[in-house]
Image (cartoon, grey):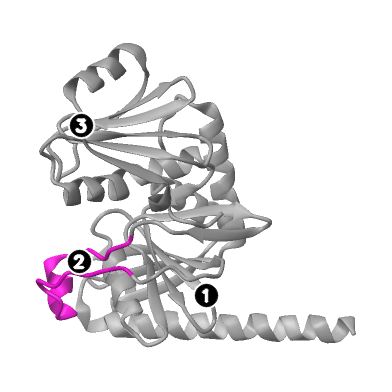
Amino acid sequence: MHTSLDSQIDWQHGRGCAAHYQWLLKHGDHLVRWPAAPFETSHTDCFALGTDYWIWQPGIGGLRFTAANGGIDALSVRGVDREWFSHVVRRCWFPPVYQVRGRQVVHASAVLHNETGEAVAFVGPSGAGKSTFAYGLAARPGWRQLSDDAMALSSESGDIVLHPIDHAPRLRPASADYFNVRGRSLSGAAWPAHTVRLSRLYFLEPHDEDLAGRRAIVFAPIGATGAYQRLLKQAHALTLKIPALNRRLMLDYLAVTAAVPSYRLAYRRSFDHIERIFDVIEDDTIASALRERVVSDEVLAAAR
């Protein structure tokens, strides 16, 4: 099933309270505490209680879900802005829900070439340029952005399939100025009706100076072992207390790096070369799709 988690949420605004959080602390199995993100004012806790999982952020509210696909309860604390609560749920709490339900989420931004069906992803830590690269490439004709900063995926019959997740683009001021969208509200494109398969991973390595040999850009393929190590560093992991989840995470990421070609994309921080980088990615994406089409035609011809 490739539907978004949004359709399963029962929004219960104003139903969360401090007593509920204290009840979870007393009766729940505390799995993990995440420190406050730069835009947050308090930590977030995750609990297991019977077959339920609870995510709770004091002063904001919580989320209740199970490992099975189905209903999700979102309880905000009274007085919390509804739009802000929705943002926290989608941006911060969806990744662990996906993992509990058998999918993985990685720090990556993905784009789709509509004609070829090729999806490529930019992977890296905060500030690496994931959002900038995805937004810029998606601004070109024939492309659409699928995710921003968080990409949901699963391994299905040898293919790596992407799943819908909140992806309203967020650009840093310099990038917003470059694309002339400073002050605008950016929205994500509609998710395609067909199954989306991941075809390329680009691991971003920004530098403040020119690279070796005075080059501003370096594209280089990465073997499966190197890609696996890099990808794990950017994985969303719920907790180390649940061995089954950790084992599945490791196996899924092995499947990703075995099936998807990976590249190191090192570049000097500058907008002077960004369009050239987009050209290379676009040319490689289209050429790859044409090669696969030729191989498929040859296989069909041989079978006749």
Examine the rendered structure and indicate whether residue 136 appears above or below residue 231. Answer: below
Examine the rendered structure and indicate whether residue 15 appears above or below residue 160. Answer: above
Q: Earlier in the sequence, mark 3 or mark 1?
A: 3
Type of amino acid at the residue the image marks with label 1: Glu
Query: Horizontal and vertical percent for residue 234?
Result: 39, 49
Magenta range is 167-188
Type of amino acid at the residue the image marks with label 3: His
Residue drawn at 35 percent across, 37 percent down: 73
What secondary structure is marked by label 3? loop
Residue drawn at 55 percent across, 85 percent down: 287
Q: Which residue is mark 1?
A: 118
Q: Which residue is mark 2?
A: 171
What secondary structure is marked by label 1? loop
Query: Horizontal and vertical percent for residue 198?
Result: 53, 65
Check if residue 168 falls in the magenta segment.
yes
Check if residue 267 falls in the magenta segment.
no
Q: Quadrant of residue 264?
A: bottom left
- How many marks the image carries: the answer is 3
Q: Which residue is mark 3?
A: 43
